[in-house]
Image: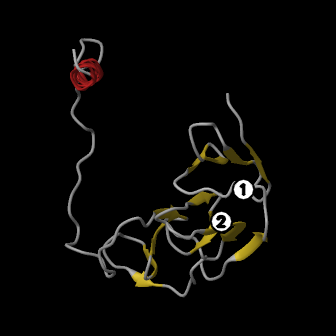
Amino acid sequence: MTTRRVAATAIAAIGLWSFAPTAASPVREAEYRWSREIDSAAFEGSYNFPVFVVRGEMWAFHPQGKWRSRDGRSWTRTGLPSSGLNTGYQRYVNFNDAVYALGTMRGNYLDLHLTSRIARTRDFEHWETLATESNLPARVFYGAVAHQGKSGSSADSTAARTTMTCGARLTAYSGRE
């Protein structure tokens, strides 16, 4: 049997195992319905930008400006400047009614210049730098989440992490679990 055929057989078997319905997991109707409220927002279409909900307002951190909305239909451009973070590579995290920018980036994929700066906005008008340099790993393509009052980042499969414990205090470690 050729290597290509073995790989195709393994992928097919995994696919059948992963997606086969079982009696223990019946498919249910969703308890919500999506509806289109407007055809497009006030800002241009784009990708790799986050949208947050903070204190009852939606915030879109679009590459060409920061926008806010109370209803998802009417959007207003704000004066919040860029944090220096590139959302195609790095992440913001929404935590305790503030948004944190984890790192900055200059350049492109051929010539990256990363920093470990941590900044936050609570008023959505200004960024305050919490740490010019931190122990945040200089990484790209990581995830950042907030869950039950704690926030964290998982940078790669070797369990490199950043854990936010009380707003501004960050502890990072890297290793195998």
**Secondary structure beneath label 2:** strand
In this view, the residue in front, 103 or 144, is 103
Q: Is residue 133 above or below residue 34?
A: below
Q: In this view, does 2 lie to the left or right of 123?
A: left
Q: What residue type is labelled 1?
A: Leu
Please report the residue visible at 21 percent of the width from the left and 58 percent of the height from the top.
Answer: 35
Instruction: Check the picture and name the quadrant holding the C terminus.
Output: top right
Dot placed on the residue nearer the N-terminal end, 2 or 1: 2
Q: In this view, does 170 lie above or below 12?
A: below
Please report the residue visible at 64 percent of the width from the left and 76 percent of the height from the top.
Answer: 123
Q: Position of residue 61 (x, y in %)?
A: 47, 72
Q: Do the residues labelled 2 and 1 touch (CB within 8 Å)?
A: yes
Q: Which residue lies furthest to the top in this view?
A: 23
Q: In which quarter of the image is residue 77?
A: bottom left
Q: In which quarter of the image is residue 21?
A: top left
Q: What residue type is labelled 2?
A: Gly
Instruction: Check the picture and name the quadrant holding the N terminus.
Output: top left
Q: Is residue 133 left or right of residue 151?
A: right
The residue that label 2 is drawn on is 103
**Secondary structure beneath label 1:** loop
Q: Quadrant of residue 157?
A: top right
The residue that label 1 is drawn on is 136
Q: Callout 1: 10 Å neighbours few (<14), some, many (20+)?
A: many
Please report the residue visible at 55 percent of the width from the left and 75 percent of the height from the top.
Answer: 107
The colour scheme of the drawn protein is: secondary structure
